[in-house]
Amino acid sequence: MSAVAARLSARVPTGARAIGLIGVAFGFLAVWLALPPFEVRAQGAPVALAVIGLGCGAWALQGREWRAGGWAVGVAIVAVLIAAWAQGRSTTTLAAIVNAGLLASTLQYATPLGWAAIGGVISERAGVVNIGLEGMMLNGAFFGIWAAAWSGTWVVGLLVAIAAGAVLAAVHAIFTIHLRADQIVIGTAINFLALGVTGYMFIDVYGDQGTPANVSMVPQVSIPGIRSLPGVLGVFGSLNLMIWLLFAAIVLVHVVLFRTPIGLRIRSVGEHPRAADTVGISVYRTRYAAVILSGMLAALGGAYLSIGFVGSFDQNMTAGRGFIALAAMIFGKWRPYGAFGACLLFGFASGLADRLQQSADVSVNLLSTLPYVLTLIALVGLIGRSRPPAADGRPYVKE
């Protein structure tokens, strides 16, 4: 028990880092109070809390705790801006923007990114950079809805989407693992290949009519007891099946990667393939399996877009989400939980932009950049401190 207590106490932040984290907490509290259901605006409490957070951030920066201090200062500035903006808005407008629907939109926008991001985690933990996630998502989106419309059931759509993602990932694996081609170039080529193939087949199969309107969709999972709960908790009472499957997949991938011998082999191949080969681990086989699995997961993200969320397909409908998933993976330090947290950040920004367009007098062109700007801001403070697997992106030559 004493050893456990010592380990926990060692993880408790102290000094400037603790002050910085306290500043972050004050900043988020200021935002929380400025928005529904509290809307403490007239008393200036949100601004006062933000100023406290700003002071804590400055203290942390003075103590050379750049990350926590930077986040505290950034959140405090955002809190002041939100409090000032909320001051001139009616209660009805604020309630229309910040409500349980915002959480639902966050999860909807984050889900396709989450599938692709954990796929990228698996591939890069094995030492292969998978820039082709965008193309694999697009492949899954088209073939998923095509198979669902052809078969009349979304189950077949998901299975065909997985197969389509696996085929494209296998092409990527052959060129990068056995032929030892540049992984960035091959990934880019995969993206263009998927864009051309899905665009051609979409026009050839559906022409100008577009995908069928009555295509079989992945169902919602309705939980009556939770659905009737007030506030944001009720959102979890009616979520798409693929959102719940993503939650399970994130936990499963984390456990496999960091708690099982299989995960140890994957990580050893990505960190030191020569040593892994010496002890009898097949580097090629492990990398092939990891890349193909990453393509299958990314394709599920694309299939969610077409038959779980939108209900249709259009050319290049992924619109760069595969690259955002790569950024989320780096933001999350090549860990499933961290990557999904970054996906939630992007999903929140997308959902917030939608609501601001509907309920506030803000330029649509400006709001369309909000998710990408927030993602870049988040990456600026952390990407330099994220260490990828040591052999990530390096072809292995067996001696």
Image (spheres, rainbow, N blue to C red):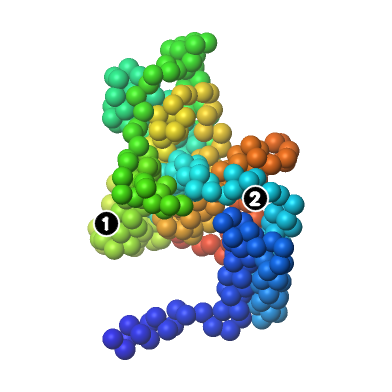
Q: Is residue 2 left or right of residue 136?
A: left
Which residue in the rendered view is the most extreme toward the bottom? 2
Q: Is residue 5 above or below residue 200?
A: below
Residue bearing the label numbered 2: 91
Residue depicted at x 34% and y 24% = 216
Q: Is residue 154 left or right of residue 195?
A: left
The tag earlier along the polypeptide, 1 or 2, is 2
Amino acid type at circle 2 is: Thr
Q: CA distance from mark 1 to mark 2?
A: 53 Å
Residue depicted at x 32% and y 86% = 3
Marks 1 and 2: CB-CB under 8 Å? no
Q: Is residue 136 left or right of residue 30?
A: left
Nearest the viewer among 238 and 177 is 238
Could you say whether the residue bearing mark 2 is in a helix, strand or loop? Answer: helix
Q: Can you see residue 292?
A: no
Could you say whether the residue bearing mark 1 is in a helix, strand or loop? Answer: helix
Residue depicted at x 53% and y 39% = 321
Residue 120 in the image: state x and y as whole percent: 44, 47
Q: Can you see residue 125?
A: yes
Q: Is residue 329 left or right of residue 69?
A: left
Amino acid type at circle 1 is: Ile
Q: Which mark is residue 8?
A: none
Residue 184 in the image: state x and y as whole percent: 53, 42
Q: What crowding class fits label 2: few (fewer than 14 Cα within 10 Å), some (14-19), or many (20 or more)?
A: some
Q: What crowding class fits label 1: few (fewer than 14 Cα within 10 Å), some (14-19), or many (20 or more)?
A: few
Residue 231 in the image: state x and y as whole percent: 46, 52
Q: Is residue 284 above or below residue 141?
A: below
Image quadrant where one finds the N terminus:
bottom left
Residue bearing the label numbered 1: 262
Q: Is residue 25 above or below residue 313?
A: below
